[in-house]
Image (cartoon, helix red, strand yellow):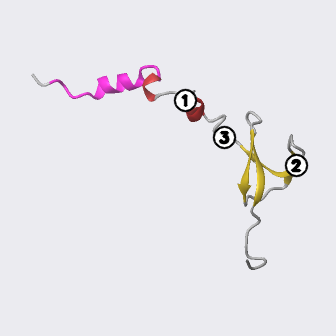
Amino acid sequence: MKDGIHPNYREVCFQDMSNGFKFVTRSCANTKEMTKMEDGRELPLFKLDTTSESHPFYTGTQKSVDNMGGRVERFRNRYAKPAAK
């Protein structure tokens, strides 16, 4: 490989800021902070707002459109075509 043209591909720790969940994967993400892992390694830290551990879709807490206080049902009743006689 040529020197100076490849990104810095290394192990990076990603941390969910809403619940503290951490996971390690390889990445080229630029980081300014470092974190100490439980096994003693010191890795670059990339902070995330949400991950699969905190996102409502993946945790099963996402609200369905049909469960929004009858708004969908009111819309359907208001704009439904009159029944054919």
Please check the rendered image and state whether residue 72 is part of the magenta-colored stretch, yes or no: yes
Q: Are marks 2 and 3 in contact (CB under 8 Å)?
A: no
Residue 61 drawn above or below residue 34: above
- First in sequence: mark 1 or mark 3? 3
39 with respect to 72 (left or right): right
Which disc number belongs to residue 62? 1
The answer for how far apart the CA atoms under marks 1 and 3 are is 14 Å
Label 1 residue SS: loop
Q: Find out whether the residues at labels 1 and 3 contact each other: C-beta distance under 8 Å.
A: no
x and y percentages locating residue 44 in the rendered image:
82, 53
| Residue at image location 36% in from the left, 22% down from the top | 74
Q: Is residue 1 above or below residue 53?
A: below
Magenta-colored span: 68-83
Residue position for label 3: 51
Name the image quarter holding residue 80: top left
Residue 61, percent from left and from top: 57, 27
In this rendered view, identify the residue nearer to me: 38 or 53: 38
* Pointer 2 or 3: first along the chain: 2
Would you say 37 lies left or right of 57 here?
Answer: right
Identity of the amino acid at label 2?
A: Arg
Mark 2 or 3: in front is: 2
Query: Which residue lies under the disc numbered 2?
Result: 41
Q: Nearer the viewer, mark 1 or mark 2?
A: 2
Farthest-out residue, left = 85
